[in-house]
Amino acid sequence: MTVATYLRTSFPNPDREYRDGKLVLRSNPDTLHSRAQGLVGAFFGERRHSLHIYPALSVRVKLRDALYLVPDVAVFYPHEPQERFPATPPFVAIEILSPDDRMADVRNKLGEYRTWGVTHVWLVDPHSKRMYTCDSELVEVSILRIPELGVEVTPADIFE
């Protein structure tokens, strides 16, 4: 499949990613995944105007010509992306685990976000109610922080 065909094709939920000419299936989200994604999106949506941030759920982002990924939540700052498929890294990229996700694939994707230039890369596991940051490795944290914006995300903000 060409990039042009991929970009004009809609797929049943969940959306597909595109990697070097091939479609990549994403894990099917379950209720906990969907709830966490909605709560994370709502958390950032409530702060959109006061912090001048631009949250987006499941948007295709272009890391390079033949690589399009779909973060569960992307937060853009300080500018709202103007492209239909942003080619500028979001300030925050958040992946939310589904039961059938393979950790090797998730780690690879998180690393690609970091290499691309995403400042804050997070992993949220709604099944175990754990949160992780990803710099050079995954580190479990009790609070997800964006010090540049004075933002703290606690488990109570995203897990019910």
Image: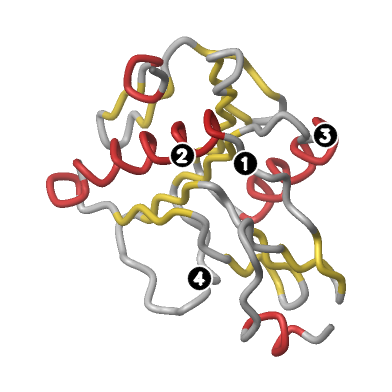
The disc, 3 or 4, on the residue closer to the chain's N-terminal end is: 4
- Which amino acid is tagged 3? Arg
Q: Position of residue 87 (x, y in %)?
A: 55, 71
| Category of crowding for the residue at label 1, using alpha-carbon neighbours closer than 10 angstroms: few (below 14), some (14–19), many (at least 20) | some
The C terminus is located in which quarter?
top left
Vertical placement of 24 versus 30: above or below? below
Vertical placement of 66 versus 26: above or below? below
Camera-nearest residue between 74 and 65? 74
C-alpha gap between disc 1 and disc 2: 10 Å
Q: Is residue 93 left or right of residue 78?
A: right
**Dot 2 corresponds to which residue?**
37
Camera-nearest residue between 79 and 44? 44
The disc, 4 or 1, on the residue closer to the chain's N-terminal end is: 1
- Which amino acid is tagged 2? Gln
C-alpha gap between disc 4 and disc 1: 23 Å
C-alpha gap between disc 3 and disc 4: 26 Å
Task: Give the residue drawn at x 21%, y 49%.
Answer: 48
**Dot 4 corresponds to which residue?**
86
- Which amino acid is tagged 1? Pro
